[in-house]
Image (tube, grey):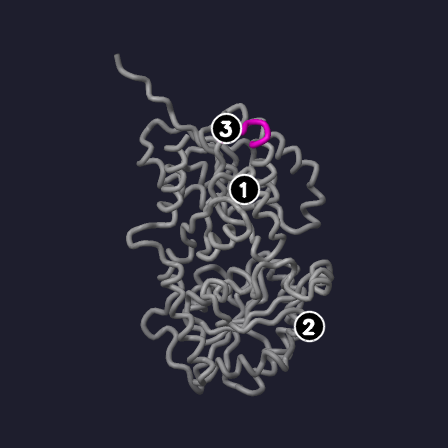
Amino acid sequence: MTAVVKPTKLYFVVGEESGDQLGAELIKALKPRLGGALELYGVGGERMAAQGVNSLFPLEDIAVMGITAVLARLPSIVKRVYQTVDDVIAVDPDVLVIIDSPDFTHNVAKRVRKKAPHIKVVDYVSPSVWAWRSGRAKKMSAYVDELLALLPFEPAIHEKLGGPHTTYVGHPLIERLDDLRPRGAERGEIGAGNRRLLVLPGSRSSEVSRLMEPFGAIVANVKEQLPDVELLLPVVPHQKKRVLEHLESWPVKPVLVEGEQAKFEAFRSAHAALAASGTVSLELAVSGVPSVVAYKLDWFLRRIKDIHRVYPIASVDTMVLPNLILKEKVMPEFLDDDVTVENIAPLLCDLLQDTPARAKQLEGLKEIDDAMQLPEGKSQAGAAADVVLNLLSRS
């Protein structure tokens, strides 16, 4: 008599497109190792649907950004949380995998743990507990069994803060080196007539609104000192109108760069950058572009910062990802009232010339590969799959 093989049931919950992509790649890595006895359930987008996840509801129902948009749709989002929890309990999966979007996915996981504590939970992408609300780490340990981190310093941070067991599985950027690294003479030696400055004010409305004015004054000053510098401003479609409105007041106008491929081409040819804090600073580091990073907090976070006299409830003394990864302030950073022409323009001028400051930052950025790379032959999805499979073996 042939033994009946019990299928492995996995339930995925994502909250936006980036999570959908991570989830789809993880499923691809798991399928050949789990064989045909695999059942997939969850909330996802088109990529996960192509891998066999029939989403409980459209991802667009919960994929909203910005406090105003979230508040406007809060009742329906809360309804989707409880609907998802009920479905997870009904399916009774071997593992629940939540991916990023903690405001939604963690609310699901917490309720599942309370109602069905036997269901194992994997959290793919750590919330930024090192930058904001560090107390979340310890709270997560109550409902997350394994945490998959995209940044190499996060396991140590969670251990320090009492968070769940955390494994570094690599960042998507380490698999896009061909997109970010110059090919042949794309960048060229820096010098008169060959200076390109990237201007990156962010992809969120709040970032663009707060940074475009000071960035305009800063690059105008740089242009005055180095008239041959070419200014490139990559813009995402949903911010183009806002960016154009701000550019009307800029004394010098950059060339707008649209589309992902054009953006990567700009990165590969750029000699320096002025950027908002965020993932883009890591893209610049991987690309080998010396940069100055700036950020202006909203009024609420600035109030907290004033109270604490440091970064808001932070566990670290820098908010720049390459600096955190390298454990050294390789990229200069400026926050709030320090985002000025006087502070930043001279640094950019140094980075746009063959100076010791430029050479020092370039040397530091060379270490980013060693800090972020996984063992040879291991992919990000493969490393994540290893953790999920190990947890299944312990169930």
71 sits left or right of 171 in the view: right
Circle 1 packing at 10 Å, graded few (<14), some (14-19), many (20+), is some
Q: Are marks 1 and 2 in contact (CB under 8 Å)?
A: no
Q: Of helix, strand and loop, which one carries label 3?
A: loop
Report how far apart the C-alphas of labels 1 and 2 lie in the structure.
37 Å
Residue identifier under label 1: 141
Circle 2 packing at 10 Å, graded few (<14), some (14-19), many (20+), is few
Q: Is residue 140 visible?
A: yes
For the point 49% across and 25% down, the residue is 92
> In this rendering, is residue 361 above or below 297?
below
In which quarter of the view is residue 79 placed? top right
> In the image, which disc is placed on residue 337?
2
Q: Of helix, strand and loop, which one carries label 2?
A: helix
For the point 50% across and 38% down, the residue is 44
389 sits left or right of 220 in the view: left
Sequence order check: which comes first, mark 1 or mark 3? 3
Quadrant of the image containing the C terminus: top left
The three-letter code of the residue at mark 3 reads His
The three-letter code of the residue at mark 2 reads Asp
What are the residue bounds of the magenta stretch?
Answer: 113-119
> In this rendering, is residue 218 above or below 94?
below
Report the label total.
Answer: 3
Q: Nearer the viewer, mark 2 or mark 3?
A: 3
207 sits left or right of 39 in the view: right
For the point 55% across and 59% down, the residue is 236
Sequence order check: which comes first, mark 1 or mark 2? 1
> In the image, which disc is placed on residue 118?
3
Q: Are marks 1 and 3 in contact (CB under 8 Å)?
A: no
Q: Position of residue 257 (x, y in %)?
A: 51, 66
Report how far apart the C-alphas of labels 2 and 3 lie in the structure.
50 Å
Q: Of helix, strand and loop, which one carries label 1?
A: loop
User: In front here: 370 or 244?
Assistant: 370
